[in-house]
Image: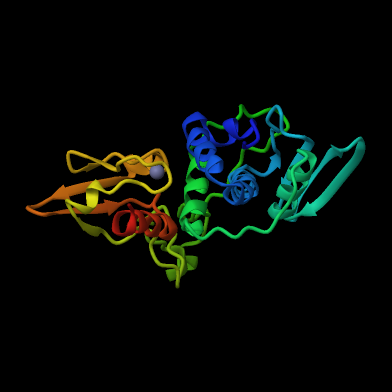
Amino acid sequence: MLPKFFNSVLGSSGFAVMQNLAKASVELESYLSPRIIVGWLRHSLYGRIVVPTECPLTKLNKSGYGYSGATNIDGVDYSFSNSSEEHVAAVITIALGKSVEPVDVKDIDLARLAKTIDLLCKAAPKAPANQYQHTVTAQPLQPEEPKQPDLNQPATNKTKNNITKPIKSKIPKIPGVRPLVQKPIKITKSESLKKCDVCGQQMFLDNVFVGCICFSPLAKNCKCTVDKDNITITFDEEWDDDSVLALVGVLKDGR
Ligand SMILES: [Zn+2]
């Protein structure tokens, strides 16, 4: 059984899917539990993280250096600082009275499962922000608006440098960084009937991508065009490399 606080980390339908998988084998459970904690931490904002009820941590903070927090293990106070996601996951696992064991799971694609966990964590409703929580997320730097030359400036100072072209794009292009929009993928209609190997649901309804429980958070971020035998899926920038690869994995190799 997975810890109950995963309900707020994954959302209730995501929690049900993961709970089902965990029931299948002890090995899978001991993989899922820490991996879900890692996914939760990755998708938490910097600052004080609201610790769900039933999570054994008494406090948790995220900064650029890592995670700091405290818990109580068998009546002994334990605190950590500037720790990794994996360390926090191990602390929670031990505080819950479970053992941390190496995992050897052969029957399931763990990379794809990890991607699903991240999607669920990202889509789960977030705990309400509190006054201590930082809610500022990183935004790309905006170029400064062009300034009008100072009217008092002597005319002789109006050199070429004072004439600024209007800036068309608000998002600055960073050299060497390719656009984040993924290439479209084409699948056959029969491939679209494959079921997700994590939650067992179908991804398409009447040739439109609706997503299974794992992918439904991204369903609105893609479009399907249908021709005779094929469906072409185009993605917006919410789909990263891993999400597209995970989807291709399900549709090409799913059960
Ligand atoms: Zn699924």
Residue 170 in percent (x, y) is at 41, 52
Q: Which sits in the foreground, 253 or 174?
A: 253
The residue lying furthest to the right in this view is 76
- Res 166 seen here: no
List x then y, in percent, for residue 165. Answer: 37, 61
Ligand 1 is in which quadrant of the figure?
Answer: top left
Residue 20, position as x, y percentages in the image: 50, 38
Name the residue rendered at 41%, 60% in the picture: 241
Furthest-bottom residue in view?
176
Relative to 40, is 122 on the left or the right?
left
Query: What quarter of the picture does the N terminus occupy?
Result: top right
**Residue nearest the observer in this picture, 159 or 98:** 98
The answer to whether residue 69 shows anywhere in this view is: yes
What residue do we see at 53% from left, 34% from top? Answer: 15
Residue at 73% x, 32% y: name it. 132
Residue plotted at (51% across, 29% down): 12
